[in-house]
Image (cartoon, rainbow, N blue to C red):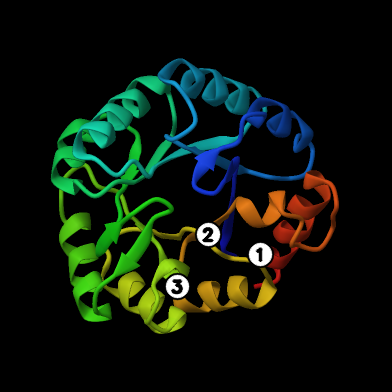
Amino acid sequence: MINFVFMLTHDDRTVPDAADVLKSVAGTGLRHVGFKDVGVTPAEIRTLADQAHDLGLTVMLEVVSTSHADEMTSLEAARAGGVDWVLGGTHGEEGAALFRGSGQRYCPFPGTVSGHPSVLSGEIEDIAAHAARLTALDGVHGVDLLTYRHAGADPYDLTAAVALAAGGPVIVAGSITGAAQIALMSQAGAWGFTIGGAVFEGLLPGGPDVAGQIRAVLAMAAGS
């Protein structure tokens, strides 16, 4: 079964009412929750992480800042903020050094990632090779793959190539809106996938409330 990570995010930033949304999903069966480094302060990272842990959830922070300085600041905040997984970012070697021995699971972006919202470019074989190099680093657990943010690559081929090459789990991040994509990513060997904006836009079954959509996505993941 593929894992579902509900992101408290829309348009690649954490939603302002993330704490209230988090309360609303208690009791849905959700196991993993995440949010972005954009739209939160370091203090809010700790507060959201503590709230999610109190609900029994695994917590992931995805780094989507575009400058080197902002990314390093966010990685430091994630290190101090008590999150369980740190996703994203484009400076894998520096991130690996920071998280080595921390117990936190660091999964940077493979391939060439740019802009905000983040987009992925490059040939499939190059992205897969980069994933292999990243996961060979001490301190890197897996990779955060922008499968559906690549303009030209076939989603299955890209994800399957990266899953085969990577020495750790592959999380498919962004732009999943339905059961067919979830099943395809499961078949391609992804460990998990994230959904945020599609829930807040009410694009998934089980709406209009967030909790109903979360339950629907969990059912899709269980059946994939």
What mark, if any, has residue 189 been given in the picture?
Answer: 3
Q: Quadrant of the N terminus?
A: bottom right
**Residue 5 image offset from top left, x and y in percent:** 57, 50
Q: Pointer 2: what residue?
A: 193
Image quadrant where one finds the C terminus: bottom right
Numbered disc 3: secondary structure:
loop
Percent of width and height locating residue 58: 54, 37
Do we see residue 167 in this rendering? no
How far apart are the two marked residues, 2 and 1, measured between alpha carbons?
Answer: 9 Å
Are discs 2 and 1 less than 8 Å apart at CB? yes
x, y percentage for residue 145? 38, 62
The residue nearer to you, when weighing 167 against 71, is 71
Q: Is residue 6 visible?
A: yes
Mark 3 Cα-neighbour bin, 10 Å: few <14, some 14–19, many ≥20: some
Relative image position of residue 14 (x, y in whole percent): 54, 36
Looking at the picture, which amino acid does disc 2 mark?
Answer: Phe
Looking at the image, residue 155 sits to the left or right of residue 94; the answer is right
Sooner in the amino-acid sequence: mark 2 or mark 1: 2
* Label number found at residue 221: 1
**Which numbered disc, 1 or 3, marks the residue that appears first in the sequence?**
3
